[in-house]
Image (cartoon, rainbow, N blue to C red):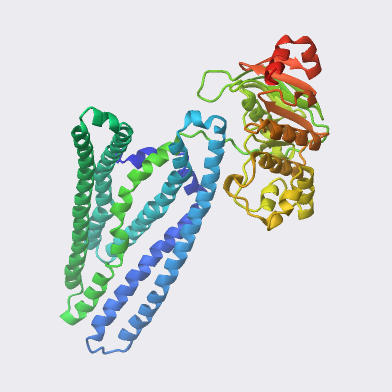
Amino acid sequence: MNKIPLLKAMKHDRWVKPFLKRYKWTLVLAITLGIVTFICASGLMFTAGYLISKSATMPFNILLVYVPIVLTRAFGIFRPVTNYFERLVSHNWVFKMTSAFRKKLYDSLEQDAVFFNSKYRIGDILGLLSEDVAHIQNLYLRTIFPMLVAFGLYAIIVIGMGIISPLMGLLMLILFGLIIIAVPVWSVLVNGARQQLEKQYTNTLYADLTDNIMGITDWVFAGRSADYLQHYNKSEKNVLASQKAMKRFEHWRDFILQVMILLVVVSLIVWGAAHFGGHWGGSANWIAAFVLCVFPLDEVLSSLPAAAQETNVYTDSLKRLNELPQPPAPSKANIEIAAPYHLKITDVYYRYPKTEKMILRGINLDVNPGEKLAILGRSGAGKSTLASLIRGDRKPTSGTVTLNNVPTGEFGDEISNYIGIVHQSPYLFHTTILNNIRLGNEDATEDQVWDVLERVGLAAMIRRLPKGLHTMVDEAGLRFSGGERHRLSLARILLKDAPIILLDEPTVGLDPVTEEKVIETFMEQLQGKTLIWITHHLQGIEMMDQVVFIEDGKISMQGSPAELQKTNEHYRALKMADEGI
């Protein structure tokens, strides 16, 4: 059993097992309904078999026919009803589970959002967000649920037959044990290895094909076109041979499975004839009943080996998920602070998990209410990391970042009530303009939305659109220019009315004219608020109260723009270079 990849992966699992415990009673209900569905199906065939064979003889009492008729109708009604409710409950369970599962996944990925590309390939990210979640969902629906239903039926069959005939109960224990346990395990072990081999062959084929097509001219010029085709054909033959071996195994496995089910049927015929005895007509009624009740079970039994075999596909997804960091525990405290809001950064050091390099080293800052602070530095200096610490998205390796003496990391989602943020690439969702702006305040009225649009200078443009506020925004907001997307993002912030605003390089990618207008809009509309502006150049820096330069994780310059202009030669040189002088 230790050789089964899924069992090894689940030994220290933090993603699947917790949800089994969290929704255990809904899971129990779904499994129970699944078992009852197959009991009703077998009961229908049992009573129908008895009724058909009994009706072929002259009954000496009408009740011998009437009772099976009633039971046949009852089982015939309850089978689809319980099956329907089982589907509702099981899918409801899976959707509840995957909803919580996705939230946990996004919370985990969010911790590394700052340098995603340095840790994960794009394919890995897409796999984590879509394929892996789908695999875990299928793990429940296609494997775990059917296996648990099968084990429930297995217990009922063995106990029921054991009460009637201990010897027959022992035989059913062996035969159904082979069908439900031995054949699926055999399938996982044999075809699981072939699946891994096929995956290796396929990955090699794709890699070789991509590399060789990109360099096909080199093969042609070298006169080795035939070698290229031979190499490709060899790789393709390996994949096809692996697939053929898997199909051949599945064919024989299914054949053996059906033979085992046939053995169950034959053993019931022999047992029925021996156990009930009497004249042939009486025993035939019970033989038909017991034999026919086996056939509905074929539906659940025949799918078990394929379902078990699919676990090899899910194992990689489970391993990737368990390699992710645990999401931070949600803050349980309902923190409320009152104005004035004072932000303080004290001796902050920070390094990313599993890295040695300190990104920030000994940062100290006091940001007073209503102050405008600019944080400058070249790319990689630690500006965006500092922004994450201020927002509480990350916690310092050492030191503190506090808002009114409360660590920002303790606010959780409530931090948005106090600190708003405009990113360098504001994202607009594929919904209406109204819904996009209401992200700042879901309870805002349309009049309030129009008010903030007037303040950011977009009201006239949006009124000219065919549907006004109800105009659909293209995916990622591509129908709007960069400056318009930044103004819409500012409208969200104004609607939220947070006292501290964090501008994380909001003008990156804008032309100089648009950049100047966007900065003027920000400064005008954010008057009276605490403003922290993270940027990499000095356009509009004169409007700030305090300027901080970060180099190699440390503060290298600090002061007001006027002070630095007078006293710091390096600042003057940077200012002249930024202005193109």
Q: How many marks?
A: 0
The quadrant of the image that shows the C terminus is top right
Q: Classify residue 260 as left or right of residue 433.
A: left
Q: Residue 543: name its quadrant.
A: top right
Q: Residue 288: name its quadrant.
A: bottom left
Q: Nearer the viewer, residue 493 or 472?
A: 472
Q: At 62% across and 53% down in the image, what residue appears? A: 431
Q: Is residue 10 visible?
A: no
Q: Classify residue 250 as left or right of residue 107.
A: left
The quadrant of the image that shows the N terminus is top left
Q: Classify residue 436 as left or right of residue 311.
A: right
Q: Nearer the viewer, residue 153 or 18?
A: 18
Q: Position of residue 322 (x, y in %)?
A: 45, 36
Q: At 33% across and 36% down in the image, what residue appears? A: 210
Q: Position of residue 167 (x, y in %)?
A: 21, 61
| Residue 255, above or below 313 | below
Q: Nearer the viewer, residue 152 or 326?
A: 326
Q: Is residue 353 visible?
A: yes
| Residue 73, above or below 24 | below
| Residue 54, above or below 311 | below
Q: At 52% across and 41% down in the image, what residue appears? A: 105
| Residue 409, above or below 169 | above
